[in-house]
Amino acid sequence: METTHLPHLPDHPLHICLFEQVQNASFLRRQLLEGNTDFEYAFLDASVLLSKNHVLASCFRSINDLLNNRLKTRNVHSEIVFALSPNSNIAESFRRFGLSDDSKNIVAIKVGGDRAKIEEHLLANVEGKAVELTDEALAGMHDAARIRKIYRLEAPKKGEVNVLSRESEALLLGSMALKGS
Amino acid sequence: MPIAIGLEGSANKLGVGVIQHSVTPPSPHDSAHSDDEVPFTSRRSKSPPVQILSNLRHTFHAPPGAGFLPKDTAAHHRRWAVRLVKQAMKQANVKVEDIDCICFTQGPGMGGPLSSVAIAARMLSQLWDKPLIGVNHCVGHIEMGRAITGADNPVVLYVSGGNTQVIAYSAQRYRIFGEALDIAIGNCLDRFARVLGIPNDPAPGYNIEQLAKTGKVLLELPYAVKGMDVSFSGILARVEEMAAKLGPGWTDPESGAQITKGDLCFTLQETVFAMLVEITERAMAHVGTAQVLIVGGVGCNIRLQDMMGLMASERGGSVFATDERFCIDNGIMIAQAGLMAHQMGFKTKLEESQCTQRFRTDEVLVNWRD
Amino acid sequence: MATETTSQRPLPAPFNNSTDSLTLITQGAEALLYKTTFLTPTTPAALKIRPSKPWRHPTLDKRLTRQRILAEARVLAKCKRDGVSVPAVLALDWENGWTVSEWIEGVTVKEALRKRNLEEGDSAVQSLMQRIGHAVGTLHSIGVIHGDLTSSNMMLRQDPTTHGTLDGDIVLIDFGLATQATQEEDRAVDLYVLERAFGSTHPREEALFGVVLEAYGGVYKGARATLRRLEDVRMRGRKKSMLG
C-alpha cells in the first residue's frame, strides 16, 4: 500500500492500493451496498482507469468538493468513484467505475485514517495480490476501447493499435474537471 | 500671461469660459471664479498652472421622455451664445485686448449645435481680430481633467452622452485602447431614463444615479466586454424589456418585494460600470500605469468613481475625477486645450474651421506633451 | 510591469492552506498565474487565479468568474480534442475562481525571438513563423478565435537540448479572451492583432510575417476569404470611426 499526499491538500493523506486477481469482488461490493462502515473505501475497477493521474485527479476533485461542502454523493469515498465520470449520473458512475461482482483488478483508496490499520484491514479483506499502482500496471489491466467509449474519445484509426496516449489523459482530466458546469 | 476664451456646444450644453495660464504659479488668492463661485486653482499639474476666470454654462433641457433634437439644440445655442460670451467676459474681468485666442469645439458632436457655436467663434475671431483655434472635444476633456486633478500620465476613461473611450497617451497622441462599439454609455443611460419617464433636469444620468440608490435587487443583464471594447445596445434592449414588465406581478423571488424602477437603475449601473472599470483596468495593466482619470458627463457619477477608486487602489494607484463644473461639457476645457495648442503655434484658418461630427481623439497631434 | 503591485489577498481554497510551493509568474488585470505542483510533488502545473473584484456586485462577480473560467476551460478542452496544441486542463473550481493546467516547459515566442542568436540567419525564424501560422490556422479551422494573439501568448515547448534556439512545438496559451466564433471578421481581427503585435514587438522579424500567413493558408481551408478580410481590417484599423 502506498500513502501519498496530493499537493495543496496536506491534511488529507491518501492510502492507495492496487489489487490484482481479486477473488471476492462480490463480497466487497455487498459490504458497500449494506453500508458496512468498516468498508469506507473508494473501490475502483481498474479496467476503466487510464493512469495514476486519472485516479489522483478524481481524488483531488473529491477532496476539494468535500472541503467546499458540495459532495454530490454520500461521502468522499463514493465521491471519488463519481468524480471519475464525465457526466453527472451517479448510478451510472458507480456502475462504470465502481465494483461489479466480476471485477478482477481493483484500486482501493482511503482518505485519511491510520495507515497501519487500513493496510491491515485491506490485506485481510481483499482477496487479491497487492501491487504498486503505476501507469504500467494500469496499462496492462485497462480496456482501452471501453475508456474511449465512456469518455467519447475518437476510435483509433484503422491499423493503429488501440492504446491510450498522454493526450488521452488530458482529455479525460478535462472532462472530469468540467463536469457539473 | 496668455488668456483664452473657449466656446463649447457639441451637444445640449452651451459653455463659455475664460482661462489664463500663469507663467509662475499663482498664489491661492489669485484665482477668479467659476460659475458657482468656488475659486479654483491648480498647481500640481505638469501642464501650466491654470486660472479659471469664468466658466458659464446654459443647458437645453428636452421635456421628460424626450431626447434633445439637433435643430432645437442648435437654436438654443444661437439664442444664448452672445449673452453667455458677454457675461463670461464680464465675470472674468478681462477686456478684448487681453484675449489671445478664440477656442471652439470643432467636433465630434452633433452637426447643428456644433455649427451654431462655430459661427459664433468665427464671428468673434473676425470682430476682435484674434486667432481661431479648433479643438477636439475629447482632448478638451482630457486636458482639463489633467490640469484640474494633477494626474500626470493617467489612463483616461472618457464617458459621456456621445463617447465611451479608454485612452492612453503615447508618442504625442491620445490613443484609443478601447471604446463602445455601438452606443455611448451616456446615451444608454439617457435613453433608459426616457423609458422610465424620469426628468431630464438636471441630467437624466443624475436622476438614474439617485434612483439607483434605492435599488437592492441585482437582476441579470448581458455583460458585453470584448477585449478592451464594450457594447451597450443589447443591455439597453434587455433593461427596456424589464421596464415594460414592472408592476405588481413582478417580484424578487428571494425577498418577495416588488421589483422597482430603482432596482432596474441599480442593475443597469452595476452592470455597465463594472464593464467600464474592467476595460480601464485592462488598459492600465497594458500600459503599466496605476493612475486613472475619469472625464465626461458620466464621470460625475459617484458610484462609478467609487468603483474605479477601489480598482485603482488595488493596483496601488488612485482615481482622479472632477466635479460637475468640469466633467460636464464646458467652455473652459475647450479654452484649456486650445490655449495649449496655441502656445505651440497652432492656428485654425477660417477656411479650415468647418465642424466635423466625426473627429477621432487620436487625430490630434498632442505636441505640447513629451 | 513596473507599477503592478501585488495586492496581498489570500489565495482561494485549497491553496490558502497549501504547504507546497506557489511562485507568482505574472499578474494581469484579470488573473494571477502561479507555478506550482499538481497531483504529484514532481509534476509542475500552472495555477490561474481569477480574484474576485471588490468593486463588482458580488452576484455579478460570481457570475462573471464562473462564466469566464468555464468558457476558457471549454475552449481549451475543445482545442485539445480537435488537435490544437494547448495546455491540458487538469482541474478547476468555478466557485473559488481557479484553474490548474499543464505546465509548458519552454519559453514564450517573444522571449525566444528577443534572445535569439542573430548569426543563425533567417531560416530558423522562417521555420518558427511557419509553425506559428500552422498553429493559428489549425485553431481557426476548428472555429476558435483566440482573442489576444501575441508572441507572449505562444510558447515554444523546449527541453534543455533545444534551449536557446527557435526549435520546439508551438503551444498556444492564455485563452482568457477566446471565443467560439465563425465570423470572417473575428478571424481577420485575430490575425490583425497578431500582425500588429509582431510589428511593435519584433520589428526585425516583421518582414517575415508573410510566412505566417502563408502557412496559415496551408492548413485553414477558409484562409482565402479571411486574408481578403484582413486587407480591409488593415485599411481601416481595428477601430471604426466614432460619431461624437
Image (tube, coloured by chain):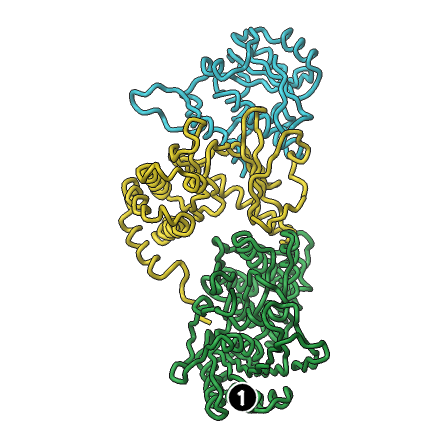
Q: Quadrant of residue B208?
A: bottom right
Q: Quadrant of residue A166?
A: top left
Place of residue C183 in the rendered image (x, y in percent of width and height, measured from the top left)? 36, 51
- Chain the render paints cyan: A
Nearer to us in this view, B297 or B206: B297
Query: Which quadrant of the rendered structure holds the C terminus of chain A?
Result: top right
Query: For the image shown, how many numbered marks are present on the structure?
Result: 1
Place of residue C40 in the rendered image (x, y in percent of width and height, measured from the top left)? 57, 24
Place of residue A174 in the rendered image (x, y in percent of width and height, measured from the top left)? 49, 32
Query: Which quadrant of the rendered structure holds the N terminus of chain A?
Result: top right
> Would residue C93 appear left or right of B136 to someone viewing this image?
right
Nearer to us in this view, C49 or B335: B335
Q: Quadrant of residue C22?
A: top right
Nearer to us in this view, B148 or A63: B148
Place of residue C61 in the rendered image (x, y in percent of width and height, measured from the top left)? 61, 50
Q: Is residue B49 above or below residue C51?
A: below
Identify the residue shown where x is 63% and y is 45%: C6
Q: Is residue A3 visible?
A: yes
Question: Dot 1: few (<14), some (14–19), or many (≥20) neighbours within 10 Å?
Answer: many
Identify the residue shown where x is 68% and y is 41%: C10
Give the residue number, with chain letter if any, for mark 1: B81
Q: Is residue B195 visible?
A: no
Chain B painted colour? green
> Would residue B102 appear left or right of B317 to someone viewing this image?
left
Chain C painted colour? yellow
| Helix, strand or loop status at disc 1 | helix
